Amino acid sequence: METGKNVIIIPTYNEKENISSIIHAIYDLEKPFDILVIDDNSPDGTADIVKGIMQEDAFRDRLFILERSGKLGLGTAYIMGFKWALEHQYEFIFEMDADFSHDPKDVPRLLAACQEEGNDMAIGSRYITGVNVVNWPMERVLMSYYASKYVRIVTGLPIHDTTAGFVCYNRKVLEAIDLDAIRFKGYAFQIEMKYTAYKLGFKIKEVPVIFINRRLGTSKMSSSIFGEAVWGVIQLRLSKKLAKKK
């Protein structure tokens, strides 16, 4: 299979309202980006919509799908996607949501931060220039903002938006990380990936973006996901200390 150099991984669960629009918005970008959708058996027919678009000539060699048996966690979806992307020789690999909270027009900016500026990882950051979040309830903004501050304090990670889910990786970052050893499945997955890349010495840049809350569909955020992040950060820090003692 021949592919482009760049692929955007989009995990989905019940995203029928957004999936066609986000695929076409990415297709309309000036630079070509392949798209890999990882669907967790969405009962609303998200996967069927994707497979229908795949039959269109314009998408026949640019759009791909992996289907899973059910909701198995955001982290495991991305790990599956990362492995697929590495096997298919992509150079730059993206994480992105399906609901337009991440603007497809910002994708080339993240790519440029890696491809042209020489960074190994680029993060679409909501907090590098203040708080750039639109239409979130205030309590959620505060929870997210102070969660990132908490992560920075506990781990020493010099990143303002540690929980960001809009990321571009140079393939060498994912090749260097033991993907099977990544332990977290939810919110903490994003923290663990950034922390691991940082500890491995990779060059990371935050690119300012405006995060807009989804207009269609239902958020997948829950208190249990947030709780995993709180305790997961402590576990990450402790595991690093224990590793130093060995």
Image (spheres, rainbow, N blue to C red):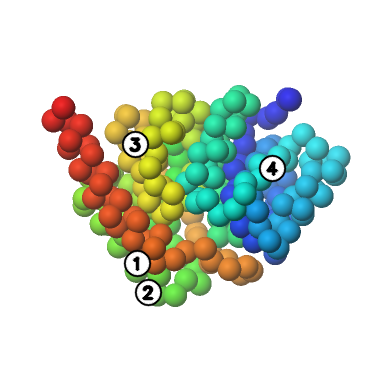
What residue is pinned by disc 2? 139
Q: CA distance from mark 2 to mark 1?
A: 6 Å
What residue is pinned by disc 3? 196
Q: Earlier in the sequence, mark 3 or mark 1?
A: 1
Q: Which mark is residue 65?
A: 4
Q: Which callout, 4 or 3, points to the residue nearer the camera?
A: 4
Secondary element under disc 2, as helix, strand or loop, is helix
Q: Which mark is residue 225?
A: none
Say which quadrant the C terminus sits in: top left
Q: Using the image, determine if residue 246 lies above or below residue 223.
A: above
Q: Amino acid at mark 2?
A: Glu
Which residue is depicted at the point 17% across and 30% down? 244
Which residue is depicted at the point 39% across and 39% down? 182
Could you classify mark 2 by the number of other residues whose Cα lies within 10 Å: few (under 14), some (14-19), or many (20 or more)? few
Which residue is depicted at the point 70% across and 28% down? 3
Q: Amino acid at mark 1?
A: Met
Q: CA distance from mark 3 to mark 2?
A: 29 Å
Q: Is residue 110 visible?
A: no
Q: Earlier in the sequence, mark 4 or mark 2?
A: 4
Q: Earlier in the sequence, mark 4 or mark 3?
A: 4
Q: Taking 235 as reference, is 23 left or right?
A: right
Q: CA distance from mark 4 to mark 3?
A: 27 Å
Secondary element under disc 3, as helix, strand or loop, is helix
Say which quadrant the N terminus sits in: top right
Percent coordinates x, y for residue 208 in the rendering:
45, 52
Q: CA distance from mark 4 to mark 2?
A: 35 Å
Q: Amino acid at mark 4?
A: Ile
Could you classify mark 1 by the number of other residues whose Cα lies within 10 Å: few (under 14), some (14-19), or many (20 or more)? few
Q: Amino acid at mark 3?
A: Thr
Please tell me which residue lies in front, 158 or 246. Answer: 246
